[in-house]
């Protein structure tokens, strides 16, 4: 019996997954709308790739159809989702180019559809436990892959999700830091909680591309040129970690999946 496909979900700077072979693009219709997915094989394993912002970064973070994306992956038989988030550092010890394997989040968004369980479906109202939103076993795969390819990755970090598409104010970043936030981004929530609701194992690596507003020496405005420059030199580090994770899966026997 073949393994279920691994899903890779990414955003800014990650609009293609060149390592995929035998690729096909398809649109999956869901109750929440359509989702565009690229199907292929990586080291011989089935992989689905989804870029949140669409081709050419045409969809802003607050308008990403997170429900359609996660529902489509679940409908296609995915069990594991590895996500990539491009972030600003709230913790001044994190520098551009650093990698963080997230283990918790703060939801500071304001107007997004947050759940599949809005009371309109047959399941009614459901309250999902998110005490471990990022799956421990999948996190360990990311950390082991990073170590194997010599890419330092912090074990644990809190993702503070803001609405966007504007960058955060210095006061908002101070608030997030007081609440324990380590990195700031615009796409990690509700993706992580929807994956939990759909019964998927989910883990995420955060690529730091700039100090968040007011952090450290960040007196200059944040610019996309600055972010793009870090992405240009750091994107390969993320791809190397993902490649090692997939390669390791391809060379090991199929372990018993822990769906908890």
Image (cartoon, rainbow, N blue to C red):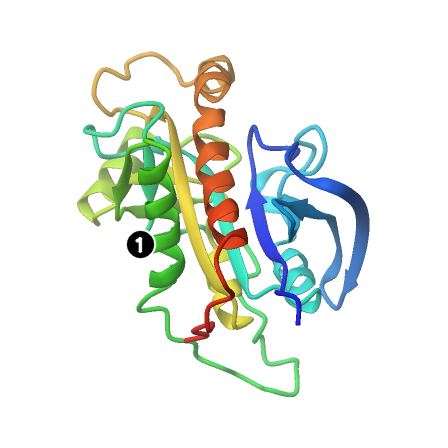
Residue in the picture at 72% in, 33% down: 55
Indicate the position of residue 15 as horizontal and vertical percent values. Answer: 64, 33
Indicate the position of residue 91 as horizontal and vertical percent values. Answer: 22, 34
Secondary structure at badge 1 equals loop
- Residue 62, compared with residue 234, is above or below; it is below
Indicate the position of residue 159 as horizontal and vertical percent values. Answer: 34, 46
Q: In this view of the protein, which residue sits in the foreground, 134 or 20?
A: 20
Q: In this view of the protein, which residue sits in the foreground, 145 or 26?
A: 145
Residue 231 shown left or right of residue 98 in the figure: right
Q: Using the rendered image of the protein, determine whether residue 245 is visible from the camera's viewpoint.
A: yes
Q: In this view of the protein, which residue sits in the foreground, 252 or 243?
A: 252
Quarter of the image that includes the C terminus: bottom left
Determine crowd level at label 1: few under 14, some 14-19, many 20+ residues with C-alpha closer than 10 A. many
- Residue 256, compared with residue 179, is above or below; it is below
- Mark 1 — residue? 103
Quarter of the image that includes the N terminus: bottom right
Residue 207 shown left or right of residue 57 in the figure: left
Residue in the picture at 24% in, 25% down: 215
Residue in the picture at 70% in, 68% down: 75
- Residue 2, compared with residue 152, is above or below; it is below
Q: Using the rendered image of the protein, determine whether residue 114 is visible from the camera's viewpoint.
A: no
Residue in the picture at 33% in, 47% down: 144
């Amino acid at each position: 019996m073949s393994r279920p496909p691994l899903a890779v979900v990414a955003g800014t700077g990650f609009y293609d997954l060149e390592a995929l072979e035998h690729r096909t693009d398809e649109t999956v219709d869901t109750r929440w709308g359509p989702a565009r997915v690229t199907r292929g094989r990586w080291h011989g394993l089935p992989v689905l790739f989804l870029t949140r912002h669409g081709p050419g970064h045409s969809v802003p973070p607050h308008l990403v159809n997170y429900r359609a994306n996660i529902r489509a992956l679940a409908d296609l038989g995915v069990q594991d989702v590895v996500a990539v988030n491009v972030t600003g550092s709230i913790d001044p010890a994190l520098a551009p180019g650093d990698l963080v394997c997230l283990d918790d989040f703060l939801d500071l968004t304001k107007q997004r559809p947050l759940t599949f369980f809005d009371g309109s479906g047959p399941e009614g109202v459901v309250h999902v436990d998110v005490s471990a939103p990022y799956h421990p076993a999948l996190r360990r795969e990311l950390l082991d892959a990073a170590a194997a390819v010599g890419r330092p990755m912090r074990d644990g970090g809190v993702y503070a999700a803001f609405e966007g598409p504007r960058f955060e104010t210095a006061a908002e970043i101070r608030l997030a830091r007081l609440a324990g936030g380590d990195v700031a981004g615009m796409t990690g929530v509700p993706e992580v909680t929807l994956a939990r609701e759909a019964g998927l194992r989910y883990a995420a690596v955060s690529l730091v591309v700039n100090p968040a507003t007011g952090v450290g020496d960040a007196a200059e405005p944040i610019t996309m040129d600055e972010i793009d420059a870090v992405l240009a030199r750091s994107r390969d580090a993320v791809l190397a970690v993902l490649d090692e994770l997939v390669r390791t899966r391809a060379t090991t026997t199929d372990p018993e999946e822990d769906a908890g």
